[in-house]
Image (cartoon, rainbow, N blue to C red):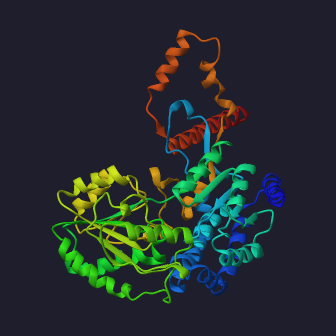
Amino acid sequence: MKDIQDRHRTLKESFSSNPRSVRDSKDLLSKFRNVLSQSFEPIAAAVKADFNKPQLEFYVAEFGQAIAETNNIINNLESMLSSPSPKTVPVTFSTMSMEVEKIALGTVLIISPFNYPLILSISPLVGAIAAGNNVVLKLPYDQLPNFSRALTEVLESVFPPEVLLVVGGGVTESTYLLNECKFDKIFFTGSTKVGKIVYEAASKNLTPVVLELGGKSPVFITKNIDLSSIDALLDRLLWGKFSNAGQTCVAPDYVLVDSVVYEKVMNHLQKAFEKFSKIDNKSDYSHVVNQRNFDRLNGLIESTKGDVIGGRTVKEDLFIAPTIVSNIDWNDPLMCEEIFGPILPIIKYDGSFQSIIKKVTENHDTPLAAYLFSSSEEDLTMLRKYLRSGSILVNETLMSAGCFVTPFGGIGSSGFGNYHSKWSIDTFTHERAVLKQPLWAEFLLAERYYPYTEKKLRKLMLLSKIPEVPFQLVKSILFYCLVFICGYFVGGVWNSFSR
């Protein structure tokens, strides 16, 4: 642990004594991108060894995304770090020049999870590095030892020790980092239970936190679903649920189907599910990451009151087959907390769409994602109006987690704070105002000084009633006034010499 403390101190001292330029950060990220691009095979083999993650899933959801997002940041970093000047200003501030700049926070801690270990490490990491911070990255070594070793080798071949510290281990190391090392921001991805522990530890040092948690993300299939495309839509639904064996923070957690289309949806869903029914413990399909989660998920299958399709388990391989459970209600064990596994409960509902949205908010408010399968703009308008969620996807699943040109983050119990590309830069910087007051404006400022009089108060109150004016226009007017005054003065001097 002493080594962690010493290395952490090195990062903090390096940030204070040798801040990186934007050019330096881009050079580091370019080198990292090049090395990572050549490392697909060993890293993919590592996650395959850890929990049987398919190479195709790993490339589509993680590796390709990590390269693309890093490229996006490298190519747009200057604009991402820029902040616009105010468009309008009150007259009382109109004499000042104003600038807003983004500055690095310092040394930050990123705690990454097991389920998408590459992208959920790299996405916040490249944002933090690009913004000028130094980073301690805690990898899930206790759950994914092969992956953690492979990624550590890549990272340490690129980033110098005064910029990045990679920490392995498990709960002991995480606890030490949270309680014994002071950070300028903590970025955590994981469960709500652990998120509360992180938040409490951070509060002792008033450390700002980004929490990327989860929750029960609902799927709404309304009577307005496009039945002519139902097979494609249900393929999207099952792909979103069963990718990575359901171990995805934005995975569809349960499905709510309008009774008007319920029978048709279920008939097509069972047909679409046939390809998943052939998956076994020898298939190219992710396994559950550890024994504790396997036992929890197996217990849910055994305790549900619904009709189970699938549900095969192989304990020695930590394998659970894709599973659908129909004919359940809101009191079923599957509806108590986030499932985070390959089990998809389905509930039939009657009544209006608004009433079922209300039911969701009463039971599982503020999910990380909400999925709407409908061709009705009215349904979408209602969902946007009555349900708070981290994101909304229409006739699609999962994609909000990978779309790095839009923000990603939770609300309420699903977390707080955004990241992805530009939003990672915003998360790992502080916007600082830089104001300059010219000395020539002193005659305009005299009314604010002591002694205070009724006359001064009336003048200031009158000024406050003047509407805001465009900032750039004020600058232009002041510039032209200065030019006019200078011209007038020079002209007067010239005329005096001419006489």
Q: Is residue 95 visible?
A: yes
Q: Identify which residue is drawn at 64% across, 82% down.
A: 46
In terms of depth relative to the viewer, which is nearer, 495 or 108?
108
- Asked whether, in this view, residue 358 is left or right of residue 29, the answer is left
Q: Which quadrant would the C terminus be assigned to in this image? A: top right
Question: In which quarter of the view is residue 428 placed?
Answer: bottom right
| Front-lying residue, 431 or 179 | 179
Q: Position of residue 124 (x, y in %)?
A: 61, 63
Task: State whether residue 281 is above or below residue 167.
Answer: below
Q: Position of residue 353 (x, y in %)?
A: 22, 58
Is residue 182 in view from this perspective? no
Query: Which quadrant of the structure image shows residue 419?
Result: bottom right
Residue drawn at 40 percent across, 53 percent down: 366
The residue at 65%/47% (across/down) is: 201
> For this view, does 323 lie left or right of residue 124?
left
Asked which quadrant contains residue 206, the reply is: top right
- How many callouts does the rendering have? 0
Relative horizontal placement of residue 415, taking residue 220 as reference (left or right): right
